[in-house]
Image (cartoon, helix red, strand yellow):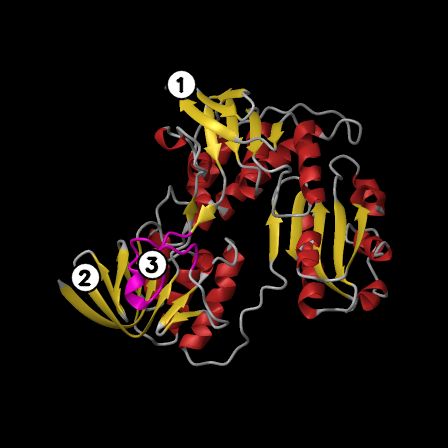
């Protein structure tokens, strides 16, 4: 076995891991980055970037269909071919990561492709290569799609988000198991391109991690666009006869489609990584860290594997904290109070901090305020496609926001100001006396503040 010395080993080169490896290499450290799949990870190849290309295309179709009554007449002929081509040519280089590899090595890092395994403190094995890190190891191994224990599901060729993003041809019909962000984003896109789509969610409303109002809004819009919804519906059997997928729901209903997309969440996989050799639990759902992303002596963990949210922006945030700590630079601990998240459906559903339920569960005395986007001047002007609302969650004792939701045509962009308010603990009394530009969607925040009570 070949043995090599280095300063830092980064296992997993998704957005966060690639950032750590590149930053440390630029700082003059000898860095080895290890990736079993594609450098850049889920986000640029199967997640954030290509899925938003799909969403952009679907939104264009929806906007074209909104022309009648506002700007004349329109006829829409969906064509998936340019979307699939754009994903291949512009986003993924046909799922080739050479540009990303060159980006890392160009900064001075070394790259190893393979599946890494910890073999002890400071030690990693990749096939017949043994590496020893003088300064430390960074775990950035991400997460993988999980499937529920539905009888028969493990034995059939269902889609994950990767298959949905990479498809060159759309199915005539699609079942989506899971009513979270990924499931709804893809369901809406496929439906807008003409696929008959049905979403099955075991809990009683869509987007179960968000405010119930967000789930109700998503349901209203999707049903209006022809998407079938089954909420509070648990699948008890999955089958595939070589042509058709069938889901049997509790209660006996059978749903069939040409394809089945399973979008029921993601989970870190620690088994097989050898974390037990450095004192970590290989059966855990995530790697616990302190505020500087330290998981053990000489071990840092960032991104999905930490369990703080399967978002690229969380991975990048944690990556920069780990870089500072490894370089011996001072910096604040990780702070997740104002963690932002966006479901990129149409309307976009942005949220930051706590939901009302979470705030009450934390023992806070809560006040909420809300305002519908269509009642705002900009929402009224926008007309077709103006669905949305703003909801604020206030810690009434301190007079500050601890959470907020902004849903609407620009829900994700409106979120920024709310995130600042939550992060900086800006008093709601001060927010009430700001000047809100007219006519903008974010003026609905002013109305929601007036509604706090």
Give the labeled residue for mark 1. 243
The location of residue 353, given as percent across then percent down, is 65, 59
Q: Which residues are magenta?
A: 268-286
Q: Quadrant of the N terminus?
A: bottom left
Left or right position of 290 against 201? left
Instruction: Kindly report which numbered mark, 3 or 1, lies closer to the viewer in this rendering.
Output: 1
Category of crowding for the residue at label 1, using alpha-carbon neighbours closer than 10 angstroms: few (below 14), some (14–19), many (at least 20): few
Question: In the figure, 348 relative to 18: above or below?
Answer: above
Mark 3 vs mark 1: which is more N-terminal?
3
* Residue 343 sits inside the magenta stretch: no
Circle 1 — which element? loop
Q: In this picture, is 135 found above or below 409?
A: below
The residue that disc 2 covers is 129
Marks 3/2: CA distance?
Answer: 21 Å
- The residue lying toward the viewer, choosing from 23 and 90, is 23
Q: Is residue 349 left or right of residue 332?
A: right
Q: Which mark is residue 102?
A: 3
Report the residue at 84% width, 67% height from top: 429
Q: Give how far across and how far down residue 221 sits, in percent.
A: 69, 33
Residue 307: x and y in percent read 48, 57
Q: Is residue 272 magenta?
A: yes
Residue 49 seen anywhere in this rendered image of the structure: yes
Image disc number at residue 145: none
Element assignment for label 3 = helix
Q: Quadrant of the C terminus?
A: bottom right
Q: How far apart, in angstroms, are the residues tagged by discs 3 and 1?
A: 42 Å
């Amino acid at each position: 076995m070949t043995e090599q010395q280095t300063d830092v080993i980064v296992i997993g080169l998704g957005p966060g891991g690639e950032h750590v490896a590149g930053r440390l290499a630029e700082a003059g450290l000898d860095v080895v980055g290890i990736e079993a799949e594609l450098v850049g990870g889920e986000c640029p190849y199967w997640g954030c970037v290509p899925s938003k290309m799909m969403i952009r295309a679907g939104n264009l179709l929806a906007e074209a269909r909104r022309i009648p009554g506002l700007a004349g007449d329109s006829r829409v002929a969906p064509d998936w071919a340019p979307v699939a081509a754009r994903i291949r040519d512009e986003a993924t280089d046909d799922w080739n990561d050479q540009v990303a590899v060159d980006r890392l090595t160009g900064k001075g890092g070394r790259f190893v492709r393979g599946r890494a395994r910890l073999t002890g403190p400071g030690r990693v094995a990749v096939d017949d290569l043994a590496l020893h890190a003088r300064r430390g190891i960074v775990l950035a191994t991400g997460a993988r799609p999980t499937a529920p224990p539905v009888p028969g599901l493990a034995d059939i060729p269902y889609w994950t988000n990767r298959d949905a993003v990479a498809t060159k041809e759309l199915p005539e019909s699609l079942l989506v198991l899971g009513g979270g962000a990924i499931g709804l984003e893809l369901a809406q896109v496929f439906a807008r391109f003409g696929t008959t789509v049905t979403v099955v969610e075991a809990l009683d409303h869509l987007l179960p991690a968000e405010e119930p109002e967000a789930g109700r809004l998503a349901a209203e819009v999707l049903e209006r666009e022809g998407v079938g919804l089954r909420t509070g519906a648990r699948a008890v059997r999955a089958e595939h006869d070589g042509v058709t997928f069938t889901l049997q729901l509790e209660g006996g209903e059978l749903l069939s489609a040409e394809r089945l997309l399973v979008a029921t969440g993601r989970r870190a996989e620690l088994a097989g990584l050898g974390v037990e050799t450095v004192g970590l639990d290989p059966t855990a759902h995530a790697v616990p860290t302190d505020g500087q992303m330290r998981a053990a002596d000489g071990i840092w963990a960032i991104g999905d594997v930490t369990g703080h949210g399967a978002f690229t922006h969380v991975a990048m945030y944690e990556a920069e904290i780990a870089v500072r700590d490894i370089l011996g630079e001072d910096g604040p601990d990780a702070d997740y109070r104002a963690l932002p998240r966006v479901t990129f459906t149409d309307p976009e559903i942005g949220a930051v901090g706590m939901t009302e339920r979470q705030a009450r569960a934390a023992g806070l005395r809560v006040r909420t305020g809300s305002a519908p986007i269509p009642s705002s001047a900009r929402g009224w002007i926008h007309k077709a496609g103006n669905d949305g609302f703003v909801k604020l969650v206030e810690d009434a004792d301190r007079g500050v926001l601890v959470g907020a939701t902004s849903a609407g045509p620009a829900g994700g962009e409106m979120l920024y100001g709310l995130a600042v308010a939550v992060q900086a603990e800006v008093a709601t009394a001060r927010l009430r006396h700001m000047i809100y530009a007219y006519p903008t969607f974010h003026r609905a925040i002013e109305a929601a503040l007036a509604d706090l009570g």
